[in-house]
Image: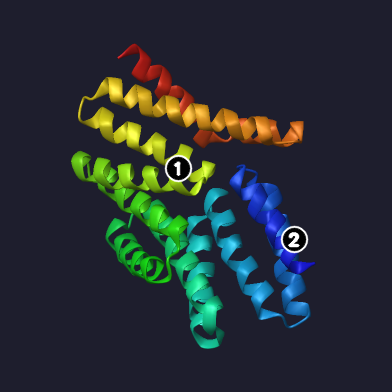
Amino acid sequence: MGRLTNTLGWLHQELGDFERSVELNRESADLGARHKNSNVEVSALINLGLDYLHLGEPERALSLLEETLVRMEKIAFGAHRWRWSIHLAAYLAETLLATGEPEKALVQVEKGFAQACSTGSMKYIAKFHALRGEIALGARQWSQAETDLGEALRRAQQTGYPTLTWQVAHLLSRARAGQHKMEDAFTTAGLAIDTIEVVVARIPDSALQHTFLAWPRIQSVREELDRFRRA
């Protein structure tokens, strides 16, 4: 039950429904703690960190993720250790970016990237390329951002991961706009919108479709596509 609840929480995260996700992940963490199942509990706590970040509580997210990292290093072994370590590095990097600490975020990116490469975790190799590109984007290092984000997009499409595909395509469009490649920026933003529309068509629940489309990150893609169209 705890694993299924945690998986449902992840699904709602993928669709921008962080309020429902936090409920599900708290339930999963409670079940894990009550039954002394650390695999369930730690997995849920990691996802809760991402929930708090997207609900506008980056400091709370950072505290939880750092505490969970300490705990993970004490109890984890085998596949759980490297999987949790990779997840935590990615979420810590995202959170540190949100708190205005790109140098610390980059440390987590490089750590996670090395682990992802050594374990053949293709989705996270793409994710860390995306995070590295996002850090370069924040520093207005447009060319470097385009290189990393382009590689992230290639790998996201190769693995068939639509969430990362539209998010990376959006960031890549910004990197190209920063270099005044407006036609390329428009095309890449269009890819993000096309991917979003494919996701919407696959969501079986109309209320969840509405929540997904109302996600500010989705709205930002649409706004920038319009801006690039006018440029």
Single out the residue that lies furthest toward the top: 230
Above or below residue 34? Residue 102 is above
Most extreme residue toward the bottom is: 74
Q: Residue at position x 54%, y 74% from top?
A: 68
Q: Secondary structure at mark 1?
A: helix
Q: How packed is label 2: few (under 14 Cα within 10 Å), some, or many (20 or more)?
A: many
**Amino acid at the residue labelled 1:** Gln
Q: Quadrant of the N terminus?
A: bottom right
- Position in image of residue 56 (x %, y %): 53, 49
Provide the residue designation for mark 2: 5
- 206 vs 62, left or right, is right
Residue 217, given in percent of the width and then of the height, sits at 50, 36
Residue that carries the numbered disc 1 in the rendered image: 157
Q: Is residue 214 visible?
A: no
- The quadrant where residue 225 appears: top left
Point 36% across, 24% down: residue = 187
Residue 98 vs residue 17: left or right? left
- Report the residue at 70% width, 69% height from top: 29
Q: Residues within 10 Å of mark 1 (few under 14, many from 20)?
A: some
Q: Find residue 96 and report its horizontal and vertical position in percent.
A: 39, 59
Camera-side residue of 177 and 104: 177
| Image quadrant where residue 22 sits | bottom right
